[in-house]
Amino acid sequence: MNIAFFLTPKSNVVHEKLKSTMRQALERMEYHRYTAIPIIDSMGKYVGTLTEGDLLWKIKNTPDLNFKNTSKIYIKDVERHTYNKPVHINAHIEDLIDLSINQNFVPVIDDNEVFIGIIKRSDIINYCYKFMKLKKAE
């Protein structure tokens, strides 16, 4: 089965640009209650994943950095420790199972490496559950 069926399109995905500030990311993640979000560059290409931990470690390891001045630090300057490996839009759902073990979401890119959305781990698990249930009924 093609993954396009499971795609949450970019327009419905909370993400940040490299030129965004830490404060923007912190506020957006807090508002939506996400612990990790995709990061895209100015050309719309997926460049990585930003996590709460990345932001916390940046604050901890930067002298005199506090919430008030996080608006002076850009996402591009925050070291990231997680990289959610992307897949191309022509991948199959079975290709995602291994990736979803360690990733909350799988970024999806087009043939030009442009970020077009994500597949959520919960959607992959639901697909597997329904598939197993169907096989059991046979």
Image (cartoon, rainbow, N blue to C red):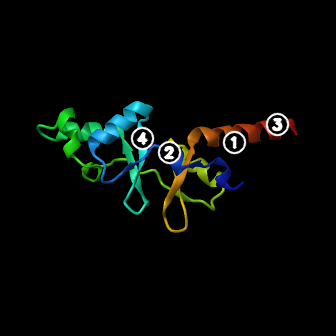
Is label 2 or label 4 in front? 2
Badge 3 density bin: few <14, some 14–19, many ≥20, Cα 10 Å: few
Looking at the image, residue 124 sits to the left or right of residue 32; the answer is right
Q: Mark 3 or mark 2: which comes first in sequence?
A: 2
Question: Residue 13 got which mark?
Answer: 2
SS state under label 1: helix
Q: Could you say which is closer to the camera, residue 17 or residue 61?
A: 17
To which residue does mark 1 refer? Answer: 127
Badge 3 is on which residue?
Answer: 136
Circle 2/circle 4 CB separation < 8 Å: no
Q: Secondary structure at mark 3?
A: helix
Query: Which percent across, then down, holds residue 129?
Result: 71, 37
Direction from residue 109 to residue 21 in the image, left or right:
left
C-alpha span from label 2 to label 4: 11 Å
Q: Amino acid at mark 1?
A: Tyr
The Cα–Cα distance between marks 4 and 1, rounded to whole angstroms, is 23 Å
* Residue type (three-letter) at the residue carrying disc 3: Lys
The nearer-to-camera label among 3 and 4 is: 4
Amino acid type of the residue tagged 4 in the rendering: Ala
